Image: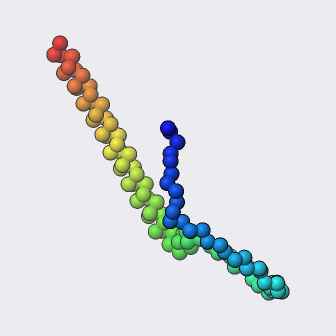
């Protein structure tokens, strides 16, 4: 009863693939004159080229996050004060 019944697949046609053997040849030789390339990330390049922009971005991000946390704290405080006022109004009606 709880096992699903799947329809018979009638649109799928299995295909066969021919296996192509790998070519046998000489392996490429590595030259000893190749110089390894050192890659630096984009962040490292940005910090090296524009350090003041990075510091400014960090300061702006910190200010935005601080203001958001402050807004949440003010909202929580006002809701707590509202709960106390409503509770006192409800207790005076008895």
Q: Position of residue 51 (x, y in %)?
A: 51, 69
Quarter of the image for residue 86 reads: top left
Q: Residue furthest top?
A: 94
Observer-nearest of 10 and 39: 10
Q: Position of residue 50 (x, y in %)?
A: 50, 72
With respect to residue 89, does 67 lie above or below?
below
**Residue beneath the point at 32% across and 36% down:** 76
Q: Residue furthest left?
A: 93
**Residue beneath the point at 52% across and 42% down:** 3
Q: Position of residue 19 (x, y in %)?
A: 72, 76
**Residue beneath the point at 48% across and 63% down:** 55
With respect to residue 12, does 38 lie above or below?
below
93 vs 79, left or right, is left
Q: Position of residue 74 (x, y in %)?
A: 31, 40
With respect to residue 84, does 70 lie above or below?
below
With respect to residue 55, does 92 lie above or below?
above
The C terminus lies in quadrant: top left
Quarter of the image for residue 85 reads: top left
Colour pattern = rainbow
67 vs 48, left or right, is left
| Count of number-bearing discs | 0
Q: Is residue 35 visible?
A: yes
**Residue beneath the point at 61% across and 71% down:** 15
Q: Is residue 44 visible?
A: no
């Amino acid at each position: 009863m709880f096992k699903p019944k799947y329809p018979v697949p009638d649109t799928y046609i299995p295909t066969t693939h021919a296996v192509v053997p790998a070519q046998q040849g000489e392996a490429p030789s590595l030259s000893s004159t190749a110089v390894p390339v050192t890659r630096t990330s984009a962040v490292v390049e940005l910090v090296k080229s524009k350090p003041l922009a990075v510091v400014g971005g960090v300061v702006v991000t910190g200010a935005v996050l601080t203001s958001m946390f402050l807004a949440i704290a003010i909202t929580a405080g006002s809701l707590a004060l509202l709960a106390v006022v409503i509770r006192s109004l409800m207790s005076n009606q008895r």
